[in-house]
Amino acid sequence: MTISKDENIHALQDSGFRITRQRRTVLDVINQSEGPLTAEAVYQKAKEINPKISLATVYRTLTVLRQAGLIEQHFLPGGHERSHFEPVGVSQHFHFLCLQCGKIIEFESNEGTQGVLQDLARHEDAAQPIRVCACVEGYCLSCVQQRTSKS
Amino acid sequence: MTISKDENIHALQDSGFRITRQRRTVLDVINQSEGPLTAEAVYQKAKEINPKISLATVYRTLTVLRQAGLIEQHFLPGGHERSHFEPVGVSQHFHFLCLQCGKIIEFESNEGTQGVLQDLARHEDAAQPIRVCACVEGYCLSCVQQRTSKS
DNA sequence: GTATGTGCAAAACCTTTGCTATAAA
DNA sequence: TTTATAGCAAAGGTTTTGCACATAC
């Protein structure tokens, strides 16, 4: 599950980037995180390791790590408004958002992925799909129960 | 295809909002648009009809129209960074983004929707799904051909 | 040694908010 | 007449950028 960072980080050089302390730090933070982190959250955790790191560097590093294929950027459903960063391939890109309480549930969906790709295949112009994500919005169990009991 | 706005706009009153010139304008702009519009784009088009309208009003109106169920807010894949607004039910919530040229293809996917909902159903906590959207990233035909011809 | 990357502060960007005047009901 | 809404300008939050210094190669 935990992939050695040093195996990883040289992807930076393969993409023509340099390996720096700050980039190691940011990558470590993301690789060791439990769930997706906002840029601000990455910054806070990175400062615990390297108090001198700046928010600008975190943003620039996130871009670079993304270009090197070391992390992915997600947007959660509903708001979508803030980007979140995770190691490549760790999380499912399927989210359910409860419109009432804001709870987010991650789930897997091979059926969904296949279905989407199958229908997409009818559009010849979408030649080479790489990544699928889906967002579902609705109400979670406890919020449904609350609503039911009110009426 | 074009639904009479006057049939539509009274949904505002049903939700306890007033009907104003600005709200008519914004709703008209969105109903008559070809594709999803950013808030800024709505503002530009609205100014052609009512030069006095302010951007703040556009934002507030977008919120109100959304609450009244007259328009929907989407986020396109890849960037996701800016919200786009469309009439309810007009567009598919499935998008393909070409990572190279940025082209976006909208498509339908009943298979995808059903697959996603089927897998989501295994999570009892996601009791009442309402809306599904999916984003696919990859490369479009012409960009794939370019890449192939280079190598 | 040279090009890239960092830190800082300032700017850019999108969106929201406070306030007074205006208009819908 | 009463209350919601519009317009303006200012503030808010996130992300980007310019520039001088530092660091990786």
Image (cartoon, coloured by chain):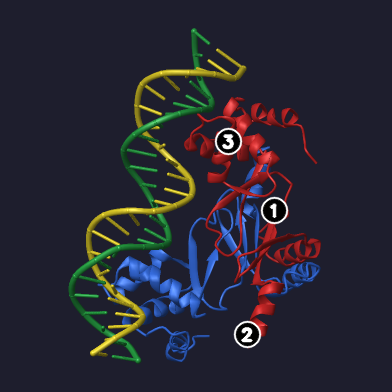
Chain colours: A blue, B red, C yellow, D green
Tell me, for residue B46, which label it has, or none: 3
Residue B94 drawn above or below residue B68: below
Q: Are marks 3 and 2 on the same chain?
A: yes
Q: Earlier in the sequence, mark 1 or mark 3?
A: 3
**Circle nearer the viewer, 1 or 2:** 2
Q: Chain of mark 2?
A: B
Q: SS at mark 1?
A: strand
Q: Chain of mark 3?
A: B
Of residues A21 and B35, the one drawn nearer to the viewer in this rendering: B35
Tell me, for residue A107, which label it has, or none: none
Q: Which residue is mark 2?
A: B150
**Is any part of residue B145 visible from this angle?**
yes
**Is any part of residue A36 visible from this angle?**
no
CA–CA distance in space, label 3 to label 2: 45 Å
Amino acid type of the residue tagged 2 in the rendering: Lys
Q: Are marks 1 and 3 in contact (CB under 8 Å)?
A: no
Asked if residue A40 lies left or right of residue B137, the reply is left
CA–CA distance in space, label 1 to label 3: 29 Å
Amino acid type of the residue tagged 3 in the rendering: Ala
Of residues A110 and B32, the one drawn nearer to the viewer in this rendering: B32
Asked if residue A144 lies left or right of residue A103, the reply is right
Q: Which residue is mark 1?
A: B131
Q: SS at mark 3?
A: helix
Asked if residue B89 lies left or right of residue A7, the reply is right
Q: Provide residue B54's location: percent of width, then percent of height.
A: 48, 34
Tell me the quarter of the image containing the C terminus of chain B. bottom right
Q: Provide residue B27's location: percent of width, then percent of height.
A: 64, 35
**What residue is drawn where x is 72% and y is 70%?**
A126
Q: Earlier in the sequence, mark 3 or mark 2?
A: 3
Q: Chain of mark 1?
A: B
Asked if residue B110 lies left or right of residue B39, the reply is right
